[in-house]
Amino acid sequence: MELEFSYSLAEGFKRLTPVRGLGGIGRPLSGSPPPGNDRIPRIAALYREGQTLNQIGIEYGVSRERIRQLLKRVGMTGDSGGRTLLSMLTGKKKNEEKINKRENRYQKIFGCSVDAFIGIHGRMWSHADRYTKTPAGRFYQQKRNAGKRGIGWGITLPQWWTMWQESGKWDLRGRGQGYCMARHGDSGGYTIDNVYICTIGQNFSDSYLRHSWEDRFNRQLAWRDEDGLTILQGFIYWCRKDGMAQKDIRDFSGLSTSACNYFYWQARKILGEPIGEQSPWLKELSAKRKRNGK
């Protein structure tokens, strides 16, 4: 019995494939030859490229521990490559993506790099800075208000701040008797060749003289309902349709009689009602008043 067992054990060892450089017996290989001393330079190169011990071991058909031992012969440690290097490269890539994302954000909002912005603002931009009286905060507020009014914006923060510095009116900027950045003729977008520094009163006068009262109403009341009427047009039209006296409409809206009539006839024109004759609903209202003796 003991003899048969020794024979079987010896036959089993014969079937195993000896591995060079391992100092023992390894498992049969299906791909690359086992790593010997002549393979260590390539293993080291793979490890420096970011492959892990396990990945290299699978390629050569040995354990990750054996790969670590071979790398140790040439003085390489865990910090020389592998997962550590892969983590460093991944972290570096994420950091570069974060920096590029931040640069794109500053270019979109302020039209300049992060370094140029810090040179003006003194620190990184934060959410709370939108409401401050700093140059960056005022720039953001004016750009946002221009967007709400549908006016184009083509000035960067450095250009905007340079204009204010050259004017010497930055400390006097503000409402009332202060200064502002206005557009020539109060038309076009905010571009470097279409803006200038002036007082609030001058800006208001330029806008008032250039635009008629009709244009000013249309600009301030640009919103329209589903029928295409502005707020004043819809209000006056439907008040008259409901039978409200013209005097009451005039007192409630604060407009003159001619202005009320103007917006009323504009509303009728937009709605497609015939101009120059009484509308059907007004005829019906007049007949109803006659029947009631009013």
Image (cartoon, helix red, strand yellow):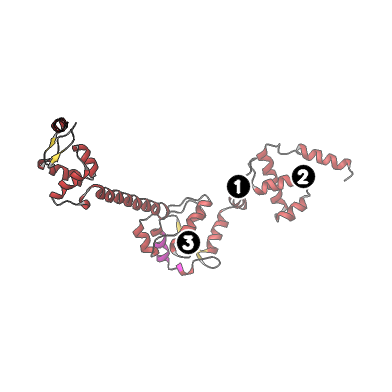
Q: Judge by depth and name the residue closer to the eye, 123 or 159.
A: 123
Residue 265 location in percent, x, y?
69, 43
Q: Residue furthest left?
A: 38
The residues colored magenta run: 160-170
CA distance separating discs 3 and 2: 48 Å
* Neighbourhood count class around disc 3 (C-alpha, 10 Å): few under 14, some 14–19, many 20 upward: few
Check if residue 283 falls in the magenta segment.
no
**Disc number lying in front (3 or 2):** 3
Q: Judge by depth and name the residue closer to the eye, 201 or 122.
A: 122
CA distance separating discs 1 and 3: 30 Å
CA distance separating discs 1 and 2: 23 Å
Marks 1 and 2, the one that precedes in the sequence: 1
Residue 229 location in percent, x, y?
65, 44
Marks 3 and 2, the one that precedes in the sequence: 3
* Neighbourhood count class around disc 1 (C-alpha, 10 Å): few under 14, some 14–19, many 20 upward: few
**Disc number lying in front (1 or 3):** 3
Q: Amino acid at mark 3?
A: Ala
Check if residue 167 falls in the magenta segment.
yes
Q: Is residue 183 visible?
A: no
Name the image quarter holding the N terminus: top left
> Which residue is rendered at x = 46% and y = 69% of the image?
171
Q: Mark 3 and 2 residues: CB-CB less than 8 Å, in contact?
A: no
Q: Which residue is mark 2?
A: 242
Secondary structure of the residue carrying tag 1 is loop
Q: Amino acid at mark 2?
A: Asp
Task: Considering the whole magenta stretch, tell me its main secondary structure.
Answer: helix
Q: Is residue 92 visible?
A: yes
Number of on-image labels: 3
Q: Which residue is mark 3?
A: 128
